[in-house]
Amino acid sequence: MNTNAVCWFEIYVNDMVRAKSFYEAVLKQELTRLDNPDEVKDFPQPEMWAFPMKQEPGASGAICKMEGVEAGGNSTLAYFDSEDCSVELARVEPAGGKVVVPKMSIGEHGFIAIAQDTEGNNIGFHSMK
């Protein structure tokens, strides 16, 4: 394999307007409508709004076991890249979300923070400072 293992993620939401507003406010990035091609007829047509992306494959990831976090349901955590994850974390509560884990060091790998979006999904932020 010459690319990272993960090539795409989807965060499922119930209220698209609320969720889109949350992510645009926290990440300070505009999401773009992403429609299925017309020739795809045998698959449900979800409403999708994409995060900004380059036409490059993938992001790395890992399986994780952590005390207090059970598998199943919402057990996949996407981390958004950041210059300083405390910046995005400070936008979470004003945008209607909750801080789950404040910014913390992960040693030589930088810093992480975990939040909950307006739909109850946990998301992470990662930065080197």
Image: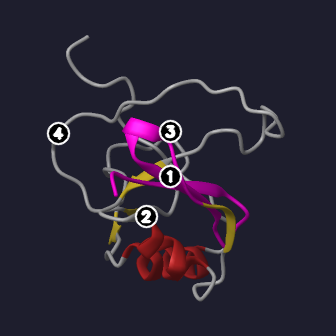
- In the picture, the disc for residue 85 is 2
- Callout 3: SS: loop
In depth, the one of 55 and 122 nearer the eye is: 122
Which label's residue is closer to the chain start, 1 or 2?
A: 2
Find disc 4 in the rendering and name its residue.
56
Where residue 18 appears, as percent x and y from the top left, is 60, 81
Give the side of residue 99 with respect to residue 32, left or right: right
Which of discs 3 and 2 lies nearer the camera? The answer is 2
Please tell me the numbered disc located at residue 42.
Answer: 3
Residue 31, given in percent of the width and then of the height, sits at: 35, 71
Rounded to the nearest angstrom, the CA distance separating label 3 from label 4 is 28 Å
Q: Who comes first in sequence, dot 4 or dot 1?
A: 4
Q: Residues in magenta? A: 103-129
Question: Between marks 3 and 2, how big is the CA–CA gap?
Answer: 40 Å
**For numbered disc 1, what is the local secondary structure?**
strand
List the residue tagged with mark 1: 112
Please tell me which of labels 1 and 3 falls first in the chain.
Answer: 3
Contact? badges 1 and 2 (CB < 8 Å): yes
Quadrant the C terminus occupies: bottom left
Tag of residue 3: none
Label 4 vs label 1: CA separation?
A: 24 Å
The verdict on residue 107 being magenta is yes
